[in-house]
Image (cartoon, coloured by chain):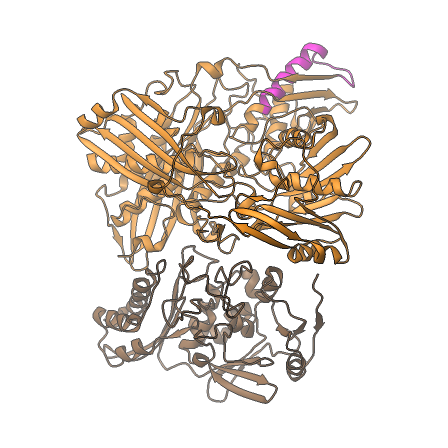
Chain colours: A orange, B brown
Amino acid sequence: MTAPRTPAVGAPTARLEGPAKVTGTAPYAYEHPATDPLYLHPVLSTVARGRATVVHTAEAELLKGVHAVLTSANAPRLADTEDAEFAVLQSDEVAFRGQFVAAVVAETPETAREAAALVRVEYEERPHEVELDPGHQDLHTPRESDTGSPPDTRQGDVEAELARAVVLVDEVYRTPRQDNNPMEPHTTVALWETLPDRLTLYDSTQGVHTVRETMAAVFGLDPENVRVTAPHVGGGFGAKGAAKAHNVLAGLAARAVPGRTVKFALTRRHMFSLVGYRSPTVQRIRLGADAAGRLGAVVHDSTGLTSRVKEYVEQSGLCSRMMYAAPARATTHRLAALDVPIPFWMRAPGEAPGMFALETAMDELAEACGVDPVELRVRNEPGADPETGRPWSGRRLVECLREGAERFGWYERDPSPGPHRDGQWLVGTGVASAVHPRANNPGSVAEVEYGSDGRYTVSIGAVDIGTGARTALTQISAEALDCPVGRVRLRIGDSDLPGATVAGGSSGTSSWGTAVFEAVRAFRDEHGADPGPGARTRAEASHNPDLERYAMYSFGAHFAEVRVHADTGEVRVPRMLGVFSVGRVINPRTARSQLVGGMVMGLSAALHEHSVVDPRHGHVVNGDLAGYHVATNADVGGVEAHWLDETDPHLNPMGAAGVGEIGIVGMPAAIGNAARHATGLRVRELPLTPDRFLH
Amino acid sequence: MRPFDYERPARASEAVAAVAADPGARFLAGGTNLVDHLKLGVSAPTALVDVRDALDDTVQALGDGGVRIGAGVPNSDLAAHPEIRRRYPVLSAALLAGASGQLRNMATTGGNLLQRTRCVYFQDVTTPCNKREPGSGCSALEGHGRDNAVLGASEFCVATHPSDMAVALCALEARVRVLGPDGERTVPLDHFHRLPGAAPERDTVLSHGDLVTAVELPPPPEAARTAYRKVRERASYAFALVSVAAVVRVRGGRFVDAHIAFGGLAHAPWRARRAEEALRGRPVTEEAFRVAADTELAGARPGRDNAFKVPLAVNTLASVLRELTEEVR
């Protein structure tokens, strides 16, 4: 599966839609033109658990310009509500604060909002529990059928290895709830037409086909009669990786006013209860090692929360199953089901919190053994995947660490634990590894057509959520077709196009590119190198048997310099450097942007991000961008992302792995480890706010 | 929609008369805080009286060597004003530590003084708040308390004042010029903002219809060293956990005097008179810094989530004093 080399792939290429975006002409979902649209504004529950016994709508209905007020009493019954997330307005039960309990459709957004404020809801409140507290809660073991991987694993004699260990690290690490907060809030523009019933959504989503499948099932429509488009999306980070309750609400509203387009944009505050978030975690790590730091046992017990109405597991322990060599290991996942909104994917779900815990623990082990942290990781390098025994499709963590150490000037550090002082600042450096699975998801279909203008049209229902996927897929198409990128016209972002998997799990470029390669191969088989106008072929990505033969992961090494103010505890990060092994890089320009963006989000998680839940009311009190701090430009100092020159011969025809998530993984640990080196204080809980360093 | 009247009078006296005549009317200047409140439902005025044409937007020299800052001067213009940068750098620094460039372009001097707390419960109409709805209770007292006041709070309210500018003005002993229905008056800045007591709905001593027309600064103390230090989690665009404005004079290794104000600790910019007294005439030593800071914070009453503010305030003041006196020690 060696890819032919043409200049298209590997060339630093500017985003094709860049000029449209910066001139404001790229239409996002809300900007979809519509004649006489109506606007939807929801009413959210203000109790965390109970029943909305009476919903008073009369005052709202009297407001001029209001077309409909939907409640559980008058909303149409849905065809399939097995997934409780989509059972919108189907009963008066309230399962979490911030759940839809009513909605208004009106002629202007202002009227809809005002009418929603006039809807008065009476509740029968029940006791609720919203805070994760593993010591005092009933915990359950998640089902393998929900996640695709066993919740618990065990290899070797863990107790014996821990007992034999010369050096033991046994610590608990905590990460807070975090919310995705893409720039563009979730938005759906819905049109319901009748005879036959048809639903069209212009949606801000990471997967038009996945939203179509859900909407068709929930509304009992033939998928052919549901169309979802997403020409441009302003970020998702996982929060737009599946249909969400607001899609269903928009569908219900559109159905109430057939023939009229209904526009629905969530507010920033709505997003803190309706689109998923990263569960807080409490993770106990036990590492047993010999005096030289060689691991005998790795034990990773992770606890998170889920919603009582729908299970979602933050699989923080997965990374410890494959990261380092050890004769014995165990991992467990436990959940507390609480009266909280439904958690969901947030950039590198599992790996991001999991590697904070593991890589902080590795730093503690290095210190306890008196071994350099880079060297400690090298010493625990496994020859094959410890979990499956499979060979690696390419594991180059050691090269990432070595090259990163070289570029960063790692060995200039004073290896002794802090504090290390430079005037009023305590200064330190830290390192951590990064990992993310390399994915190539089955099921994507692509179509190639040759036009009378001498250009190829490549069609696939992929979505560019701001990553540069449109540009990368155009480059891949040009390489597969062996033509310049200017002769490729790429069509994406529409469920009427051939089916594509979701833009998630760093799988998009890999999975969609595979389908494009297969479609081009089929096209050439059918039409040859010199096709006539109108020649057209469609193909689905065939099964890649190497996916079961090899352990496929991307790796990376993060280095950070941290300064902590000796008086105030303020934490600043003047320098971050990452070296990544991500297969072949399709577009250095957008890949660098993804890696740097991931690192910055890791910085943000390390220093700032924390959704604070008020246990009395059950809501996030800092649910806006004034209160939920994400890193600003001023927080970001030097940031460098490098990658190894390589190709993965087993993953896909391009040899390229995804780059969307690995940048965030390990970054918080590198920063925390650097803060420890700077101050001598070990902080095992994110975020690293100034108060943690005051003494 | 909630309709409201809008007018934009040319004279301050007309604006005052318009607001005084309507209990539901509010002044509008840059709108950087009030417009948020309209959106959040925190405020629902019947009329907005836009004072941008009515307010002076210049900085003028005063006969006593001080300056008069028109209430309509945008924060960004004030921060960049050559006389302010040269003679009152602490004010310029405080302004630039606040908000973002875009907000500073819109926000005015008067509006900055009158901005309201960012307490998350005050801004969330689904939760009780005595400041927003007197008598409804204080959600912050037992709730998320990281940003709460540690000085001068009451059982009715633990909100903090968010301004950076006002902290510097407090240390500079500014005077606020106010035009009300009964004429003009002057209020010293450290009496302008109230402590919450039993009436947290009142942020300042102003009455309905009172309009801030200018802020006057006395001439800066001769040979004073000044600093504004803002401590926050994020490097920009965040409110202060603690901030310190300091104007100190040192001679012969001793403090002559010091004017110090804290932000982030109280319902108002907190003039640190106890610390000032503790420094007066004392030798410039680390011990003197600590004693002064400890003395001021001795009356702190932190809650569950904000105990860190006490050592943080002590350390920050000590740090500022150390930096300001480095070469004389």
Quarter that holds the C terminus of chain A? bottom left
Residue B253 occupies which quadrant of the picture?
bottom left
**Which x, y percent locates residue A314?**
44, 34
Residue A509 placement, left or right of A296: right
Establish if B98 lies above or below A235: below
- Farthest residue, direction right: A195
Q: Residue at x 54, y 73 (%)?
A: B109
Residue A487 placement, left or right of A167: right
The kind of secondary structure the magenta stretch mainly shows is helix
Which region of the structure is painted magenta? A512-535
**Which x, y percent locates residue A157?**
25, 21
Residue B303 placement, left or right of A364: right
**Which x, y percent locates residue B186?**
51, 86
Viewer-side residue, B157 vs A686 = B157
**Does residue A456 show up magenta in the picture?**
no
**Which x, y percent locates residue A619?**
50, 51
